Image (tube, helix red, strand yellow):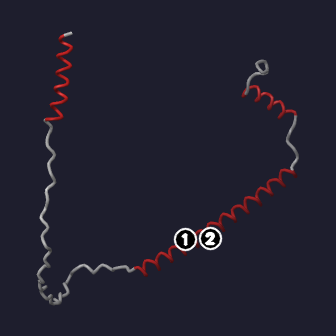
Amino acid sequence: MDSFWVIVLFILFAIFSDKKGGKKPVPKRRTPDLPRRPLPDIMQPRRERIEIPELRGAPPQPQVVTMPQVQERDEILAEQQRYQEMLRRKKRQQRQEQAASQSEKAAAALQNRPSAIGLNTLQQAVIWSEILSKPRAYRK
């Protein structure tokens, strides 16, 4: 029981000494309020226009593209894309029409020819169904 009171006293001492002996808060540093003085007027040196002679054998100057030129180029590209899309639609429509006409021709040809179902083809169909699927004995 004596050791219990020693431990309790030690904990209380540690708590109170920490609160009392903590660091003092550092006050904020104040800067003096100085009157604002205008900056002195400094004369800018005059710049003289220097003529640069043309260099022989130098690469050509890059062409600078302005905003209207960029907009004009974008409009031309948009027009070209619309034209290409129109051509693609026409080709697609022609292919669909050709496919429809070919399917109509094939359907007409199938209707005109006689059926090729005979005794031999029926026997072959039964044999292949036995080979490719479950045997009849295993079917439910």
Question: According to the image, label 2 marks what residue?
Answer: 86
The kind of residue on which mark 1 rests is Gln
Above or below residue 95? Residue 125 is: above
Asked if 85 appears above or below 71 in the picture, the reply is above
User: Callout 2: 10 Å neighbours few (<14), some, many (20+)?
Assistant: few
Figure check: 7 above or below 54 = above
Residue 87, percent from left and from top: 62, 70
Q: In the figure, residue 93 lies in which quadrant?
A: bottom right
| Residue placed under numbered mark 1 in the picture | 81
Give the residue displayed 43% in from the left and 81% down from the top.
Answer: 68
Give residue 61's position: percent from left, percent from top. Answer: 28, 81
Crowding at label 1, few (<14), some or many (≥20) Cα neighbours within 10 Å? few
Give the residue displayed 43% in from the left and 77% down from the top.
Answer: 70
In which quadrant is the N terminus drawn?
Answer: top left
Residue at disc 1, secondary structure: helix
Q: Nearer the viewer, residue 120 or 136?
A: 136
Q: CA distance from mark 1 to mark 2?
A: 9 Å
> Which of the pair 136/15 is nearer the observer?
15
In the picture provided, is 101 more to the left or to the right than 113?
A: left
- Residue 131: % across, % down: 73, 26
| Residue 83 as seen in the image, left or right of residue 140 | left
Q: Which is nearer the eye, 51 or 129?
A: 51
